[in-house]
């Protein structure tokens, strides 16, 4: 059975592999892969879904069977767990974040980390799958329930406060008001602890929204995948209040990605944020190194990198592929259209973190003395407009193999020659087909989308 997609294991709760019996075997396979015949500690945290405790109990059964132990960190963002593992300095640690990222609460899954806080390699994923598929042993249910360990959260929050102080200093009396959509997920407690209890209070004011997780409201009409909600909230606030919101940011459920909204209501996605931060690094920090994006990175922005003399590299979609490429070529920044922005100046490993991205954008705005609407204009994305269509399907692999559909794909590619591009792929985390259309003519994009939807085999 294939377990891992582009970003960990994910699926609907109650359906394989997100079942108690499968998670027991997965826990055993993870411990066996990470520690072999030695013993270690697996640190486990979650993004607040109601199914997290059941999954954690099952994972612990398997981990205990291998002989290792677990430590529960409770509600914690994925970047915070990664940071804790990296700073612990122990080669006998591993980590599991129980999360389905931007998916609805009915879904759940896990992301697995090594002792350095890095997502495990494809080789380790394959080993876990091999052990899982060859393990029929019944695993016991009698486990002890220990209390939460808050060390990881405290360590992360203090580190981010220090990072914020280093990045933003009140030299020009800049004051900003930011609306932060926490997606009722893992960052719901972090943002107040970081921004309200640091020197940023008075320099930066925040209005947190969707920061009351109840186990079932994560990503529900909020967060990075429902950006129109944040747009509407900013519009209402700016209409009814004298002090306007400078910009807004929406995180996803586990806090490793962010999408921004300008004071005028325009969306600034991961492609644009990556370009804005890369240009700032070049112009203000003398960074002449490479930048890593993906095949989905807007073509107009790719062209803008070339004009600036910035060496841009495109990888397959998935932040783990961006991680790997950044490490290979010693890049200090990379990211995806979806809002995963990865930097290396917070800790010395490539890590995607929505809050760290927010702080870097704040630094850019304050030091350039520009607003986000101004910075969006220079990204060149408007030169070649794009549209991403997400099509729900029952069987994404079958959809991609279908001969009639493949003919439609070919026709689309022929229609955009020399005027744009078309990228079609199956999502690695959901039963979706993702179609990216880029064309110089926005009307043509709508025609191409209609052609696609009218001619594919929808079943």
Image (cartoon, helix red, strand yellow):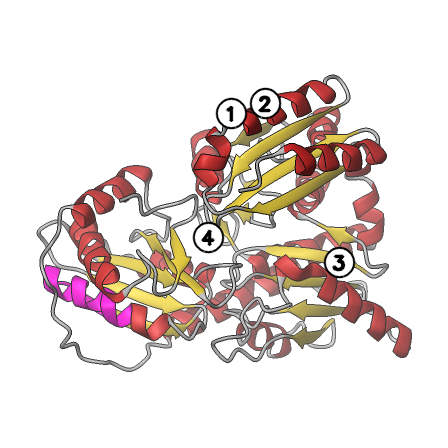
Q: Residue at x 63, y 75 (%)?
A: 210
Residue 407 got which mark? 2
Residue matched to label 4:
347
Q: Which residues are magenta?
A: 56-70
Q: Are marks 1 and 3 in contact (CB under 8 Å)?
A: no
Q: Residues within 10 Å of mark 3 (few under 14, many from 20)?
A: many
Q: CA distance from mark 2 to mark 1?
A: 6 Å
Secondary element under disc 4, as helix, strand or loop, is loop
x%, y% of residue 265? 82, 59
Q: Secondary structure at mark 3?
A: strand
Residue 3 in view in this figure: yes
Front label number (4 vs 2): 2
Label 4 with label 3: CB-CB less than 8 Å: no
Q: Neighbour class for label 2 at 10 Å: few (<14), some, many (≥20)?
A: few
Q: CA distance from mark 1 to mark 3?
A: 40 Å
Q: Are marks 2 and 1 in contact (CB under 8 Å)?
A: yes
Residue on which disc 1 sits: 403
Q: CA distance from mark 2 to mark 3?
A: 38 Å
Which mark sits nearer the N-terminus, 4 or 1? 4
Q: State whether the magenta stretch is mostly helix, strand or loop.
A: helix
Residue pictured at 66% horizontal, 61% vertical: 226
Of circles 4 and 1, the one toward us is 1
Residue 380 showing in the rendered view:
no
Q: Nearer the viewer, mark 1 or mark 3?
A: 1
Element type at mark 1: helix
Q: Nearer the viewer, mark 4 or mark 3?
A: 3
Q: Work out how far the residue at label 4 is from the one at label 2, CA to CA, in angstroms.
A: 47 Å
Q: Residues within 10 Å of mark 1 (few under 14, many from 20)?
A: few
Question: Is tag 4's residue or tag 2's residue first in the polypeptide sequence?
Answer: 4
Residue 407 in the magenta stretch? The answer is no
Which residue carries the number 3 mark?
A: 261
């Amino acid at each position: 059975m294939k377990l891992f997609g582009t970003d960990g294991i994910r699926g609907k709760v109650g359906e394989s592999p997100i079942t108690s019996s499968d998670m027991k075997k997965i826990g055993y396979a993870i411990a066996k892969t990470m520690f072999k015949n030695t013993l270690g500690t697996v640190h486990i945290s979650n993004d607040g879904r109601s199914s997290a405790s059941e999954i954690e109990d099952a994972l612990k059964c398997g981990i205990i069977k291998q002989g290792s132990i677990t430590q529960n960190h409770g509600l914690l963002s994925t970047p915070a767990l990664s940071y804790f593992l990296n700073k612990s300095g122990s080669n006998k640690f591993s980590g599991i974040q129980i999360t389905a990222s931007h998916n609805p609460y009915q879904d759940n899954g896990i992301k697995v980390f090594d002792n350095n806080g890095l997502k495990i390699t494809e080789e380790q994923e394959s080993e876990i799958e091999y052990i899982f598929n060859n393990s029929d042993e019944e695993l016991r249910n009698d486990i002890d329930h220990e209390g939460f360990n808050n060390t990881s959260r405290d360590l992360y929050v203090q580190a981010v406060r220090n990072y914020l102080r280093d990045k933003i200093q009140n030299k020009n009396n800049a004051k900003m008001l930011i609306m932060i959509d926490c997606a009722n997920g893992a960052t719901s407690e972090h943002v107040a602890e970081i921004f309200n209890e640091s020197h940023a209070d008075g320099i930066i004011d925040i209005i947190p929204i969707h920061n009351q997780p109840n186990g079932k409201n994560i990503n529900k009409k909020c967060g990075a995948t429902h950006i129109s909600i944040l747009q509407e909230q900013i519009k209402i606030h700016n209409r009814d209040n004298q002090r306007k919101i400078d910009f807004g940011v929406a995180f996803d459920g586990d806090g490793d990605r962010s999408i921004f909204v300008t004071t005028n209501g325009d969306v600034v996605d991961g492609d644009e944020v990556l370009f804005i931060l890369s240009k700032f690094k070049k112009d203000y920090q003398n960074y002449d190194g490479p930048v890593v994006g993906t095949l989905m990175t807007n073509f107009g922005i790719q062209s803008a990198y070339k004009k600036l003399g910035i060496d841009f590299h495109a990888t397959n979609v998935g932040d783990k592929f961006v991680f790997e490429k950044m490490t290979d070529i010693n890049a200090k920044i990379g990211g995806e259209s979806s809002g995963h922005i990865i930097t290396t100046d917070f800790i010395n490993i490539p890590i995607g973190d929505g809050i760290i991205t927010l702080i870097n954008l704040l630094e850019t705005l304050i030091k350039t003395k520009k607003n986000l609407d101004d910075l969006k204009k220079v990204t060149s994305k408007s030169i070649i407009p794009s549209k991403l269509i997400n099509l729900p399907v029952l069987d994404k692999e079958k959809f991609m193999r279908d001969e009639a559909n493949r003919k439609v794909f070919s026709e689309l590619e022929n229609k955009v020659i020399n005027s744009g591009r078309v990228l079609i792929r199956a999502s690695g985390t959901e039963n979706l087909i993702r179609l990216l259309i880029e064309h110089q003519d926005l009307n043509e994009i709508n025609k191409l989308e209609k052609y696609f939807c009218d001619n594919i085999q929808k079943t």
